[in-house]
Amino acid sequence: MCLFCKIVNKEIPSNIILENDEFLAFHDINPKAPIHILVIPKVHVNSFNEADSELMAKMSNFIQKVASEVNIAKSGYRVITNIGVNGGQEVGHLHFHVLGGAKLHWGHFSDADPKGHF
Ligand code: AMP
Ligand code: ZN
């Protein structure tokens, strides 16, 4: 069973913010912003690349509720999902990072030459 499935099953503790039958939101153990929440489906899905549109529609609503719950809906926030090796995904269970609580930085994500890829 994967790490986040164990969190869903409460075999591994987490600091839960919001939960319903299908989704769970909890604080990231290694926050990269004043507010850094992970939102996951309770069902195991490897990544965004395997997520169907019905799941994504419901997950979007849940993420919006999480943002309201922690009071960042008005001030603004960022939603990120890493996919696969190049995306930097470390946990193979679909999760959205919800980051906020301060003005976030934005920058280059890779030093590789973009022209070399296409
Ligand atoms: P990613 O690199 O997109 O797969 O993100 C994985 C995230 O999971 C990282 O931000 C980690 O800090 C976070 N993480 C790993 N283990 C735990 C845990 N037990 N509880 C909460 N967050 C975790
Ligand atoms: Zn899982």
Image (tube, rainbow, N blue to C red):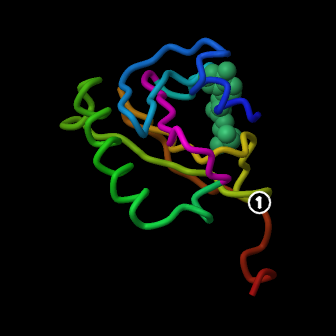
> Which quarter of the figure has residue 102?
top left
Whether residue 2 sits left or right of residue 32 in the image: it is: right
x and y percent of residue 72 in the render?
Answer: 27, 31
User: Which stretch did the figure color magenta?
Assistant: 34-46
Q: Is mark 1 within 8 Å of ligand 1?
A: no
Residue type at mark 1: give it.
Asn
Q: Quadrant of ligand 1?
A: top right
User: Toward the viewer: 54 or 71?
Assistant: 54
Q: Badge 1 is on which residue?
A: 86
Which residue lies at the image location 43% right of the left edge and 37% below the top edge?
A: 23
**Can I make out residue 102 in this image?**
no
Q: Is residue 103 above or below residue 12?
A: below
Residue 40 painted magenta:
yes
Residue 82 painted magenta:
no
Viewport quadrant of the C terminus: bottom right
x and y percent of residue 100 in the render?
Answer: 38, 32
Which residue lies at the image location 39% right of the left edge and 63% below the top edge?
A: 54
